[in-house]
Amino acid sequence: MVGTSPDFAPYEFYHIGEDGTPQLAGFDVALAQRIADDLGLELQMVPMDFDGILMELQNGNIDLGISGFSPSPERAEVFDFSDLYYTGGQSFCIRQADKEKYTKFEDFKDLPVGAQNGSIQYGLAEKNTPDANIIGLAKVTDIVSELVSGKLEGAFIETAVAEQYAKNYPELCVAWDVEYDSEGSAIAVQKGNTALLEAVNGVIKTALEDGSMDKYIAEAGDLASDEANTYEGQLDAEGNVQQ
């Protein structure tokens, strides 16, 4: 069982098929399927809010957590992490209309700045905009919606995700890069599960070397750009997109 938060395109999201059925997609999902296939296992993805994944992993309710996790030193004290499968970055986003208004973090004193709860980005908000009114939200989709609508003045978002949103929302601007020591994504494993960690690392190594990971990333980007058929968030009890 693999926990993921499907509000993080192009990592993980729902793509609506021709029959109207939402299917999990994204390069994290493709990598999870590759791991299951190579290990001879059946993949069961478990969608949940981002800040619940590591808790469920720690409690033994899932086997892996894959949701664009940065292997920070704090997280590594509690979980084991795979080798990096994607090297990304961190970005600060504002509205296009405010590009000249906001040019540095100090401009956000007492202003609302958003970040996802339980994420590396929330820590970056605390570090870089300590005088701002930092607002934590459960989903990146909510952060983007509130930024575009004017309820937030800025937001910390992972670079690949920010760039994807900027393609779909012309009002959004990726203003500047945010310095962060651990640039990249890894899969979370229960502490001490060495056998599973080694098996996952073996699949990651192969996927990087044979070019599969590049293919997964490109395909996910193409699907995520199909805004009309992309949904980010949780499904309802019947497995349908929530309106």
Image (tube, rainbow, N blue to C red):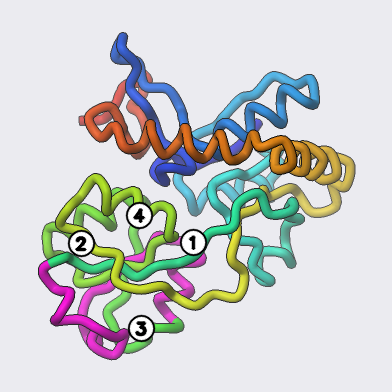
First reached walking from the N terminus: tag 3 or tag 4: 3
Classify mark 4: residues with Cα within 10 Å, few (<14), some (14-19) or many (20+): some
The magenta stretch is 97-126
Give SS at disc 1. loop
Give SS at disc 4. helix
Q: Quarter of the image holding residue 87?
A: bottom right
Pair 3/1: label in front: 3
Label drawn at residue 163? 4
Q: Which residue is mark 2?
A: 147
Residue 5 locus on image (x, y percent)? 47, 42
Q: Determine if the magenta segment contains residue 131.
A: no
Pair 3/4: label in front: 4
In the picture, the quarter occupied by the C terminus is top left
Q: Are marks 1 and 2 in contact (CB under 8 Å)?
A: no
Q: Alpha-carbon distance for marks 1 and 2?
A: 19 Å
Of 60 and 73, the residue lying toward us: 73
First reached walking from the N terminus: tag 2 or tag 4: 2
First reached walking from the N terminus: tag 3 or tag 2: 3
* Residue at x-position 41% and y-position 36%: 13
Q: Alpha-carbon distance for marks 3 and 4?
A: 21 Å
Q: Are marks 3 and 4 in contact (CB under 8 Å)?
A: no
Q: Alpha-carbon distance for marks 3 and 2?
A: 16 Å
Give SS at disc 3. loop
**Viewer can see residue 48:** no
Residue 128 locus on image (x, y percent)? 41, 83
